[in-house]
Image (cartoon, rainbow, N blue to C red):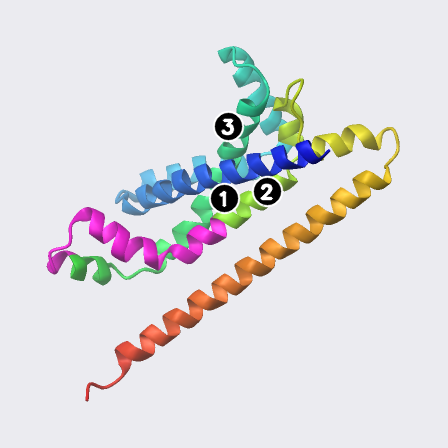
Amino acid sequence: MIEIVLETLLIAILSSLCATIIGTFGALGIYSTKQRRLRNIILSLNNILMVSPDVIIGASFLIFFTFLGLGLGFGSVLLSHIAFSIPIVVLMVLPKLNEMRPALVDAARDLGATDWQVLSKVILPYISSGIFAGFFMAFTYSLDDFAVTFFVTGNGFETLSVEIYSRARQGISLEINALSALMFVFSLLLVGGYYLLNQRNQAHKAKRKQKMGAPVK
């Protein structure tokens, strides 16, 4: 059971990191798309995994991996979790990009900043709260997912949700209750950590605005 918990956490961490990176750059690509129609089409495609039932998503991934001849196990579960977590990150990051004033980027370019400096010094710090929100949402979704994982997991590899389901048919034991309680407390700690981090970022932005608006002596 401890091994299953560690594998579940490993899947959640790796899938969240990959989905956060891909989703952030995907949101930047959508934001930079000038054609409104093309942008709406991309957003609609991004939302397919958000509105589709988990059973349909899991069955689709199973058919896809079987068609490609990929074995089911750690790799299939990881790829599936990355795939359904990317739209979550995009939806968390894109509103922050829409809130950003284009004048910030224009000012950085006027001061001689390169594209990488604009991205790393201006855009990413501004949307950092959305990136962290996307990471934590992807992590909790991956940690909690059952339907998709049930379809794409193979022999010799299981996550905690699948193991609890398989044991529930035989009767819930005290071991399962204890692990479920620990995972619940762990999820609460993550939510609390995200809340404190968000409050810290908002306070930092408020102080920076006050300094910028303060009269020069």
Q: Within the magenta stretch, is there residue 113?
A: yes
In the image, 85 versus 54, the foreground residue is 85
Q: Are marks 2 and 1 in contact (CB under 8 Å)?
A: yes
Disc on the earlier residue, 3 or 1: 3
Mark 1 sits on what residue? 88
Q: Amino acid under label 1?
A: Ile
Residue 25, compared with residue 208, is above or below; it is above
Query: Which stretch appears magenta?
Result: 109-134
Q: Amino acid under label 3?
A: Leu
In what element is the residue under mark 1?
helix
- Look at the image and tell me whether residue 47 can be seen: no
Q: Residue furthest bottom?
A: 217
Q: Are marks 2 and 3 in contact (CB under 8 Å)?
A: no
Quick one: label 3, few (<14), some, or many (20+) residues within 10 Å?
Answer: some
Disc on the earlier residue, 2 or 1: 1
Query: Residue 101: percent from the left, percent from the top?
Result: 28, 62
Q: Are marks 3 and 1 in contact (CB under 8 Å)?
A: no
- Separation of marks 3 and 1 at Cα, in angstroms: 15 Å
- In the image: residue 112, left or right of residue 131: left
Mark 2 sits on what residue? 141
Mark 3 sits on what residue? 79
In what element is the residue under mark 2?
helix
- Separation of marks 2 and 3 at Cα, in angstroms: 14 Å
Query: Residue 113: percent from the left, percent from the top?
Result: 15, 54
User: Mark 3 against mark 1, which lies toward the viewer?
Assistant: 3
Residue 32, compared with residue 166, is above or below; it is below
Q: Residue at x 54, y 48 (%)?
A: 137
Q: Residue at x 59, y 18 (%)?
A: 72
- Separation of marks 2 and 1 at Cα, in angstroms: 9 Å
Residue 208, compared with residue 40, is above or below; it is below
Q: Residue at x 53, y 40 (%)?
A: 13
In the image, 94 versus 205, the foreground residue is 205
